[in-house]
Amino acid sequence: MIPARYAAYCPNCGGEAESERLAAGLACARCQPDPQKPPLPGALARFAAQEKALADWTRYFTAQVGAPPWPLQRAWAARVVQGRSFAMLAPTGIGKTTFGLLTALWLAREGRRSYLVFPTRLLVAQAAERLQALGASFTAYTGKPREKEALLEGERPIGLFTVAFLYKNHARLPRPVDFLFVDDVDSLLKSARNVDRVLGLLGFAPEDVEKGLALVRLRRKNPEEAERRAERLREKARGVLAVASATARPHSPRVHLFRELLGFEVGTPSFALRKVADLYEEAFWLSQEELWARGAEWAGRLGKGGFSSSPGTCRRRPPWTSPASSGPGASGPGPIWSPRRSRPSGGARRTTSWGSPPGATPWPGAWTSPGASATPSSSGCPSSASP
Ligand SMILES: [Zn+2]
């Protein structure tokens, strides 16, 4: 490889970096003078710390629950360690509450504060029972005055209460909150002002909320400018908000404050978690039997969920051969087929609210030719789809 210097390629500082260092998985010489040691504070260092925290969360979850987290729960945890707020739009039974309880417990080990908000006292009591079984230190409000006092004094790192409790006591609840989990956002949004209360717990002042409302209006006229201002405003967030919903049909326009101040939407129904690779093979001078054999081989490699389409017999000349040197008996170009990998569609593209879980291995791992975009039937042969 010819050594090269890239002007803005250091994964840590975004500055100039040498190709040898990049190939070795290192930051630039300024960011990581000693290759044996981790890089100085920067984007790469932050990423490494987040990966470490996520691995720690996964270990903790597995030990407490007795089973590893679902991929979706892990994707939510990745948001928490990145300090990003998000909506959990998933049907009942996917483990939203388990995720909330375990994440609060995990954070409490470092003395970080979490509130979990439920629609009813019964749900508070049920969640409290589960925390009790896990030996957690928490305060749950089920209607007793001393529970209320303990919550308002901030005696324990984890607080469980109802939407009604938040409504009445938000001004006296200790803040900021590191993790605010809302078990049912639809019940929270019955009072649109609860959005302000939640934002207040996360460190936003009333004037920030006013600015957020102005941004909701500005976004209709000038989305770019609104986004620029929103990014500055979002820096004031002091904790992560996670809202769960099975339906996500918020009616109040005030819910758009979540987008402006915390950078996520509640009303985007999307459940997709995909890992898709588009592949094609250039196969020339193959008989019908050989094509079928190639198809069978691909079907084996793709396994469950593969979809392939194969053209009929193709007798066209490969585009890189001259007429004189081509033909079945001629010495053609190296391998007759060359699988190419395009960007995984869906996985990397951010069309869904959470995309593929961070840290997921791209498939298939060994092939790397980013930028190559697959076009089916580039051989010029007429393609007849046969799944
Ligand atoms: Zn650097």
Image (tube, helix red, strand yellow):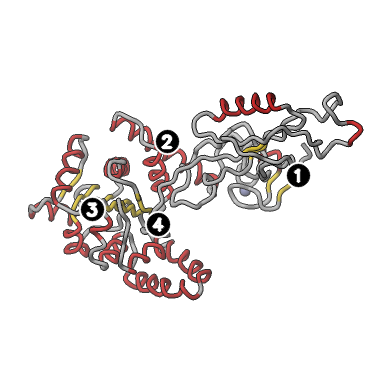
Residue type at mark 4: give it. Answer: Thr
Q: Does dot 2 land on a helix, a strand or a loop?
A: helix
Image spot of residue 145 (x, y percent): 8, 55
In primary-sequence order, the first of circles 4 and 1 is: 1
Q: Which residue is mark 2?
A: 55
Q: Looking at the picture, how far across and down is residue 183, in whole percent? A: 26, 51
Q: Does mark 3 have its CB less than 8 Å from ligand 1?
A: no
Q: CA distance from mark 3 to mark 2?
A: 26 Å
Residue 4 is tagged as 1
Answer few, some or many: residues within 10 Å of disc 2's Cα (few below 14, many 20 plus, some between 14 and 19): some
Of mark 1 and mark 2, the one earlier in the sequence is 1
The numbered mark at residue 117 is: 3
Q: Are marks 1 and 2 in contact (CB under 8 Å)?
A: no
Q: Nearer the viewer, mark 3 or mark 4?
A: 4
Q: Residues within 10 Å of mark 4 (few under 14, many from 20)?
A: some
Say which quarter of the image contains residue 26: top right
Observer-nearest residue: 318 or 244? 318
The residue singled out by tag 4 in the image is 268
Q: With 52 as the anchor, is 37 left or right in this view?
A: right
Q: Position of residue 362 (x, y in %)?
A: 55, 37
Image-quadrant location for residue 39: top right
Q: Looking at the picture, how far across and down is residue 58, in whole percent?
A: 38, 35
Where 28 sits versus 200, above or below?
A: above
Q: CA distance from mark 1 to mark 2?
A: 34 Å
